[in-house]
Image (cartoon, rainbow, N blue to C red):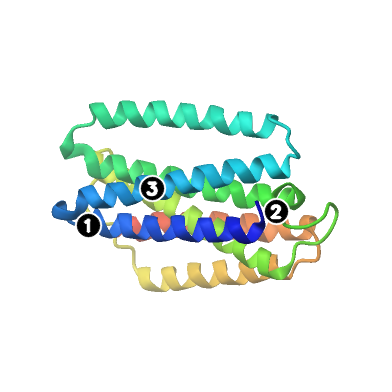
Amino acid sequence: MSLNVVTLLYLIASVCFIQALKGLSHPTTSIRGNLFGMVGMAIAVFTTAALIVKLAAGSPLGLGWVIVGLIAGGVYGAWRARTVEMTKMPELVAFFHSMIGLAAVFIAVAAVVEPWAFGITAKDSAIPPGNRLELALGAAIGAITFSGSVIAFGKLSGKIGGKPLLLPARHWLNLAGLLVILWYGREFIMAKDVASGMTPLIVMTVVSLLFGIHMVMAI
């Protein structure tokens, strides 16, 4: 499977996910939204499995770990889908979103540490700036999604008070946080090697976590 085909399949999966979110926004289209989501996830899973087999040169070890993760996540998801109360569905969705964000952060960090394992570059070669930009966006957006969704889960489940936390000059705090994220993201993109780029990536990710918390606590 060529990388062009992989990119095309991932693009189709992304379109399906967008249509899923659109469908799930209203009860009358929720069934269609679920179908789009299932189709998109099936495409993404099978494409990733084929890509892993190709990158591993036929070795089943990497795919084995993926199958273990799929079984664990599938069993838990099926159990939660059968047992969750409809009134608790929003907090369940918030929990799932937080896990997606955390996975994005882990993938970005792993790709920075060992880019050759993801087919980004040859071993001991510098990561191209375009790929660094993608990894920075993945880490920042994933961190904001994770921390914000955790707070949303806490508010919806009653574990965190529903009263908005309105700090003084909160808009300026948000602006400062965004500027720090952009600055350290730039530092990561411009870094010459993994060692010098890791600190900016960590700082950017931590600030993104705090940014997500502050944004949702104010709601």
Residue at 58% across / 60% down in the picture? Answer: 7
* Label drawn at residue 25: 1
Residue 78 appears in the picture as rendered: yes
Could you tell me which quadrant the C terminus lies in?
Answer: bottom left
Residue 31 is left or right of residue 59, and the answer is left
Residue 125 is left or right of residue 1, and the answer is right
Residue at 69% across / 50% down in the picture? Answer: 118
Classed neighbour count for the residue bearing mark 1: other residues with Cα under 10 Å, few (<14), some (14–19), many (≥20): few
Residue 152 is left or right of residue 42, and the answer is left
Give the image location of residue 168, x and y in percent.
34, 67
Q: Which residue is mark 2?
A: 112
Q: Are marks 1 and 2 in contact (CB under 8 Å)?
A: no
Q: Which residue is mark 3?
A: 39
Classed neighbour count for the residue bearing mark 3: other residues with Cα under 10 Å, few (<14), some (14–19), many (≥20): some
Give amino acid for label 1: Ser
Give amino acid for label 2: Val
User: Could you tell me which secondary element the residue under label 2 belongs to?
Assistant: helix
Q: Which of the marked residues, 3 or 2, is nearer the chain's N terminus?
A: 3
- The Cα–Cα distance between marks 3 and 2, rounded to whole angstroms, is 30 Å
